[in-house]
Image (spheres, rainbow, N blue to C red):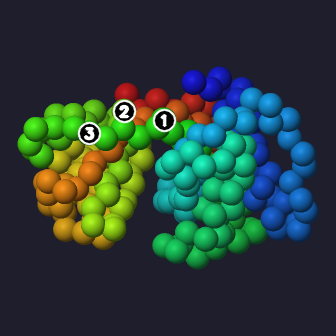
Amino acid sequence: MLSLSEGKKLVSIARKELDNYFMNQEVEKWDVSGFKKKLGVFVSLHSYHSKSLRGCIGFPIAQMPLWQAVREAAKSAAFEDPRFLPVAKDELDDIIIEISVLTKPSLIKVKKPEDIISSIEIGKDGLIIEYSGYSGLLLPQVPVEQKWTAEKFLEQLCIKAGVSPKTWKNASAKIFKFQAQIFAEKTPKGEVEEVSLA
């Protein structure tokens, strides 16, 4: 578990990465002593005024030190999310940064697919599906925001992966769950809080 001060530091790293991108400057050298562990992470960008998603990219599986993953995910969320136009410089003052630090995904093992539903806790679990070369991920905060049931969560996960909504029932589909510690700005460039989904 990360402390709130560590969460604030991660958000500031992401914020600096975006600011410096437009100033064509290298991000300053950070004290990364507490962030060398490799962890999965997602960076989400939201428009403060419209409350809409502006970009979300990350690494579900730990690939690099946390500080580096946050930097890379922040840039990708702002400029490489194919669902959105790249963030413009004049948007930065309206962007809220949210960072989700993930636990290692664990395979949900059940005797029959229908039992997967009771294995999911809305407000706690995020989900990953892998099926026949397709994959998709939804963070724990998504079903809370959308007021989905566990079954709806699974169907939307399948749609995210580009497969039929009922694919989660296929015996060859693998469903993983994970948890996330979430840190987010309350206002653009403002105070950072740890977000509780309960």
Give left or right: position of 174 versus 89.
Answer: left
Q: Amino acid at mark 3?
A: Ile
Q: Which residue is mark 2?
A: 124
Q: Residue at x 73, y 36 (%)?
A: 36
Disc number placed over residue 103 in the picture, else none = 1
| Residue 186 seen by the camera | no
State whether residue 148 is above or below residue 94. Answer: above
Horizontal and vertical percent position of residue 17: 78, 55
Horizontal and vertical percent position of residue 131: 27, 62
Give left or right: position of 181 versus 94.
Answer: left
Q: Quadrant of residue 126?
A: top left
Q: Amino acid at mark 2?
A: Lys
Disc number placed over residue 108 in the picture, else none = 3
* Quarter of the picture holding the N terminus: top right
Q: CA distance from mark 3 to mark 1?
A: 14 Å
Q: Residue at x 63, y 40 (%)?
A: 38
Q: Is disc 3 placed on a helix, strand or loop?
A: loop
Q: Earlier in the sequence, mark 3 or mark 1?
A: 1
Give left or right: position of 42 versus 7.
Answer: left
Q: Quadrant of residue 72?
A: bottom right
Front one among 14 and 72: 72
Crowdedness near tag 3: few (<14), some (14–19) or many (≥20) residues, C-alpha within 10 Å: some
Horizontal and vertical percent position of residue 18: 75, 59
State whether residue 52 is above or below residue 68. Answer: below
| Residue 183 seen by the camera | yes
